Image: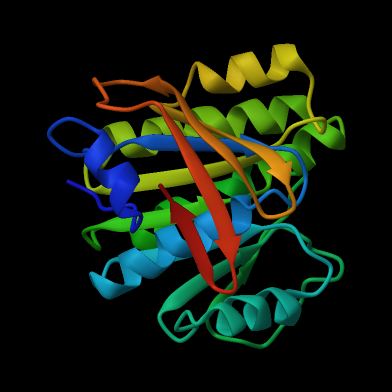
Amino acid sequence: MINLGIPALDKAFKGGLDNGKIILIKSKPRAGKIVFGYKFLEQGLKQEENCFYFFHKANTQEAIEETENYGLSTKKLKFINSNMIYGRTTSPNVVICDLNSPSAIDVLDGLFLDKGSVRGVITVISVLFSKGLFSIAYYLLNHLRRLVDQNPHWTFLLTIEQGAISEEEMQEAEKLVDVGIELVEKKPGEGDLLIYKSYKPVTKKSFNYKVKTNEFIVT
């Protein structure tokens, strides 16, 4: 079983949430997706799992500092930046890959092969779709699906920004995930959290959420 690090959600899945799954969380911009992701990584680091954060940013150091400010141990966390032009860094914990090349996405295979439990937060899907790189976006989604199917102790959390991709593209992405969560922000930093897709029964589908400093609270 895998812990999300958010008790109310962990209890919602009957019998617990299994490893080897893909979880999708979608929302409008700045509704709390990334803090949810940090919480997910924090739990993995506590359990001494191999954790990574796959993003597309102009400044790799900024991404590292953001996770440090949240309280994550960046010495144990692997960072993957898909910005080949501006993402360069000398940090041994950072891997740079080319967003325009499907083969570069295969970097995940080599990083964690034969290393036991792996959990990762992947935020590049929206970037791929917004740049019109549809074939690479679908390649990545299918590649992630294949990885979790082949490695039952790997679990991925995907974040997708509503509005960055079309409804049709969102539906295609949702076909490849096991759990779908939507954040519906009512006012800054809080709103409704909905489990709208699940591979197994849930005891509750609708929650309230609130984002505070370094916390994602669900009730």
Please tell me which residue is depicted at 78% across the width and 46% down the height of the picture: 29
Q: Position of residue 207 (x, y in %)?
A: 45, 37
Q: Position of residue 112 (x, y in %)?
A: 35, 60
Q: Nearer the viewer, residue 193 or 79?
A: 193
Q: From this viewpoint, which residue is outermost toward the left? A: 15
Q: How many marks?
A: 0
Please tell me which residue is depicted at 74% across the width and 57% down the height of the picture: 56
Classify 34 as above or below 65. Answer: above
91 with respect to 4 (left or right): right
| Colouring scheme, one of rainbow, by chain, secondary structure, one colour | rainbow
Q: Position of residue 38 (x, y in %)?
A: 51, 64
Please tell me which residue is depicted at 23% across the width and 42% down the height of the picture: 11
Q: Nearer the viewer, residue 55 or 3?
A: 3
Classify 183 as above or below 123. Answer: above
Classify 109 as above or below 68. Answer: above
Q: Nearer the viewer, residue 66 or 57?
A: 66
Q: Quadrant of residue 5?
A: bottom left
Please tell me which residue is depicted at 45% across the width and 75% down the height of the picture: 77
97 with respect to 197 (left or right): right
Q: Quadrant of residue 76?
A: bottom left
179 with respect to 106 (left or right): left
Q: Position of residue 111 (x, y in %)?
A: 42, 63
